[in-house]
Image: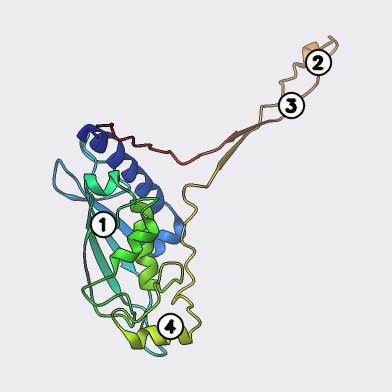
Amino acid sequence: MSNSFYEDTLLKEEFHLVARLQQDTEFSRYVTVFYEDRVSGEERPVSLPPSGSRYPEKYTVQYRMPVYVSPGQLRRDWQGTVAMQLSEPVLTNKHSYHGPHVTFHSNFAPYNNHVLQNSICSGNAWVVARDNGLWHFIISLGALINQDEFVCAEGGHYNRDAYAYWLSRNRNPVTNINWPLDLLAKETRIVIEPKPPQINPLKIAQKTSDKTPPRMNIEIKVKPREIKITEKKK
């Protein structure tokens, strides 16, 4: 495994997928993603490309969503920030349980068995997301905050009372967020309508074909890019 493959292929692919994720309307209501430019050192939104040829390793993800602070008490002013750093071992070994390095802080603690004011259970989120990479990991952390069942492990973890309250709510999420988990499965369909033929009134008497060209349907299917890594035999 060469470092150039990590720099020029893996980091580039992760960046483009995260930038595509940010374009999702539902996702962007609750989450905004930034990265640290490796040339200028400035923080930039993922909607802007890097200023040089090196793709980012460090991302900052800002979450804004309603959370419970006690049974029946909902607050809508919660904000949390996750700083995460990619590395070559993380991206070249998707089966590893060790995900991106993560630090977390928020303006107050939610009533959540996976999240404290300055800590979040990123390990379980990575286990759910590791086959897809960074974009899915970002969603998984948001789903932990939102208490979506697909990513929440059973048990008290940080807060047994919060876990019991989640069970009493039938394991329902705090907010019904339509996470774009099908990001890699979406297809783009483009239909091209040919222009109708122009009729010259001076040549009406001539024998010309008046048939309109058939409608052309062009389908472009966007499939996930697969990167196969084969270790050299020793």
Q: Are marks 2 and 3 in contact (CB under 8 Å)?
A: no
Compared across the picture, whether 34 is left or right of 72 comes to left
Q: Nearer the viewer, mark 4 or mark 2?
A: 4
What crowding class fits label 3: few (fewer than 14 Cα within 10 Å), some (14-19), or many (20 or more)? few
Assign the C terminus to one quadrant of the image.
top left
Q: Earlier in the sequence, mark 1 or mark 2?
A: 1
Reply above or below: 207 against 142: above
Q: Which residue is mark 2?
A: 209
Q: Residue at x 46, y 61 (%)?
A: 179
Q: Residues within 10 Å of mark 1 (few under 14, many from 20)?
A: some
Decide which of tag 4 and tag 2 comes sooner along the chain. Answer: 4
As measured in the structure, the alpha-carbon distance from the residue carrying label 1 to the one carrying label 2 is: 68 Å
- Disc 3 marks a residue whose amino acid type is Pro
Q: Amino acid at mark 4?
A: Trp
- Please tell me whether mark 4 or mark 3 is closer to you in this view: 4
Choose the circle earlier in sequence order: 1 or 4. 1
Question: Which residue is the extreme one toward the front?
Answer: 234
| Numbered disc in front, either 1 or 3 | 1
Kind of residue indicated by mark 1: His
Q: Give the label on residue 98, or none.
A: 1
Calculate the distance from the C-alpha at mark 1 to the C-alpha at mark 3: 55 Å
Q: CA distance from mark 1 to mark 4?
A: 27 Å
